């Protein structure tokens, strides 16, 4: 069997480190690995599959030696500069940043939803935004069966989605709260350093993820709207979104309200969702069973619960969708794309 060579760029970050864990859990036919980060982490050691590797500094020549695949998780500017270099040297890049997602020549892929789009790649495949990935996994089987007309997204997103600095802000906030620092009514003069968010995330919900745009939405909200249309191949879908950062370390939760064109039966919806690859339905309200962030952390699936009719519409439904944003929302999805590339290469 053919053996492949894979690079992970951003191997020291939140997503990169999880990618290493997911790779260790899978048994892919990859015989050589290399791990890259910036100058800051160059020389650090990582233990992977029982072997010690040294983190290398990424530069223009990093892809002179041939790699079959590279998973990039090092931010948009790094992807913008280095992903085309890697692709020009015959490496297929799976990019976690937002840099190429809306590029018409770059497939935007969730393997359970649109795996065939992988075949159209010209050297770069984009991994969608974390909040989009878990949403479209839940929506795809419903769209196939009942034809979605409109989607209303409301998200409750974990700080790990903002990388190491996001986690720092929450943990540092908790530490200061425990020390008795009183900033609860005084967010303007936070007595501790904030690395990522404009206000303390501890004890707050911030209706603000990524930058604000001229249309009043945040970039994160527009990513969910535009990426959903691209992945579901439907530009005319009506979608709106409000994305909120909440004081949760890991796993994004989403309330998704959907209007269908066709009538549906609630039991059919539950069956269709539970039979779809990558979805686990947890929906037993009489026993208080529904997906929660702490249970979903460390798992690769998308969890769906609170499945109930929206009585304000002719054919509408509400869903509660939770997934580990670092796994299914980033690392796992990227590695599943690599698995598909290997499958298609056979
Ligand atoms: N966190 C999520 O839920 C999530 C989900 C989907 C997508 N993403 C995307 O994935 C990417 C990484 O996110 P993250 O949360 O893992 O961020 P992070 O924890 O801040 O890690 C950033 C990583 O990028 C590396 N890096 C930064 N500048 C670099 C450069 N010039 N050259 C090479 N490596 C460089 C860092 O290396 P050093 O150690 O040397 O600084 C580190 O390994 C971002 O594009 C993000 O938007 C994140």
Image (cartoon, rainbow, N blue to C red):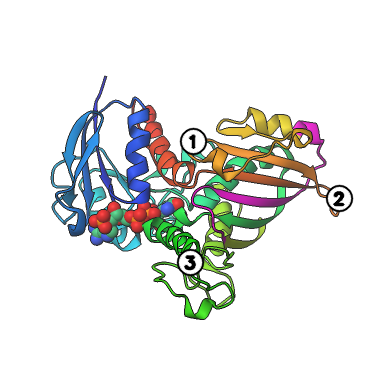
Position of 270 compared to 322: left or right?
right
Residue pointed to by mark 2: 311
Q: Position of residue 32 (x, y in %)?
A: 20, 32
How many labels sit on residues?
3
In the depicted structure, whether residue 154 falls above or below residue 188: above
The label on residue 300 is: 1
Q: CA distance from mark 3 to mark 1?
A: 25 Å
- Quarter of the image where one finds residue 5: top left
The magenta stretch is 245-268
In this view of the protein, which residue sits in the foreground, 129 or 92? 129
Q: Is residue 123 visible?
A: no
| N-term mark: 2 or 3 | 3
Residue 182: where, in percent of width, then height? 53, 72
In the image, is residue 267 part of the stretch drawn in magenta?
yes
Measure the alpha-carbon separation of dots 2 and 3. Answer: 33 Å
What's the CA distance linking mark 1 and mark 2?
Answer: 32 Å
Q: Which residue is mark 3?
A: 210
Quadrant position of the C terminus in the picture: top left
Relative to 308, residue 191 above or below: below
Task: Determine the secondary structure under disc 1.
Answer: loop
Q: Secondary structure at mark 3?
A: loop
**Mark earlier in primary sequence (3, 1):** 3
Q: Residues within 10 Å of mark 1 (few under 14, many from 20)?
A: many
Question: Which mark, residue 145?
Answer: none
- Mark 1 or 2: in front is 1
Q: Quadrant of ligand 1?
A: bottom left
């Amino acid at each position: 069997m053919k053996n492949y060579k894979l690079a992970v760029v951003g191997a020291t970050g939140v997503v990169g480190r999880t990618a290493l864990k997911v790779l260790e859990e899978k048994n892919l036919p990859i015989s050589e690995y290399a791990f890259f980060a910036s100058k800051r982490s160059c020389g650090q050691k990582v233990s992977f599959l029982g072997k010690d590797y040294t983190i290398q500094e990424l530069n223009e020549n990093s892809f002179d030696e041939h790699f079959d695949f590279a998973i990039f998780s090092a931010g948009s500017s790094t992807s913008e500069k280095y992903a085309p270099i890697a692709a020009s040297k015959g490496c297929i890049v799976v990019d976690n940043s937002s840099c190429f997602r809306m590029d018409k020549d770059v497939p935007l892929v969730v393997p359970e939803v649109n795996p065939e789009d992988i075949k159209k790649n010209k050297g770069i495949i984009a991994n969608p935004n974390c909040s989009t990935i878990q949403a479209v996994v839940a929506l795809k089987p419903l769209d196939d069966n009942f034809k979605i007309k409109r989607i209303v997204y409301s998200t409750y997103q974990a700080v790990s989605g903002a990388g190491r600095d996001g986690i720092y802000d929450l943990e540092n906030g908790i530490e200061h709260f425990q020390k008795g620092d009183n900033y609860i009514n005084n967010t303007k003069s936070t007595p501790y350093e904030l690395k990522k968010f404009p206000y303390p995330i501890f004890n707050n919900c911030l209706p603000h993820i990524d930058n604000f745009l001229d249309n009043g939405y945040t970039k994160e909200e527009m990513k969910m709207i535009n990426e959903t249309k691209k992945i579901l191949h439907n530009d005319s879908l009506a979608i709106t979104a409000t994305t909120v950062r909440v004081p949760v370390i890991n796993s994004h939760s989403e309330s998704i309200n959907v209007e269908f064109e066709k009538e549906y039966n609630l039991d059919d919806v539950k069956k269709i969702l539970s039979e779809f690859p990558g979805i686990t339905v947890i929906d037993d309200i009489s026993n208080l069973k529904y997906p929660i962030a702490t249970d979903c952390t460390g798992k690769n699936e998308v969890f769906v619960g609170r499945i109930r009719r929206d009585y304000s519409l002719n054919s509408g439904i509400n869903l509660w969708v939770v997934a580990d944003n670092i796994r299914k929302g980033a690392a796992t999805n990227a590695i599943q794309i690599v698995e598909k590339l290997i499958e298609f290469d056979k």
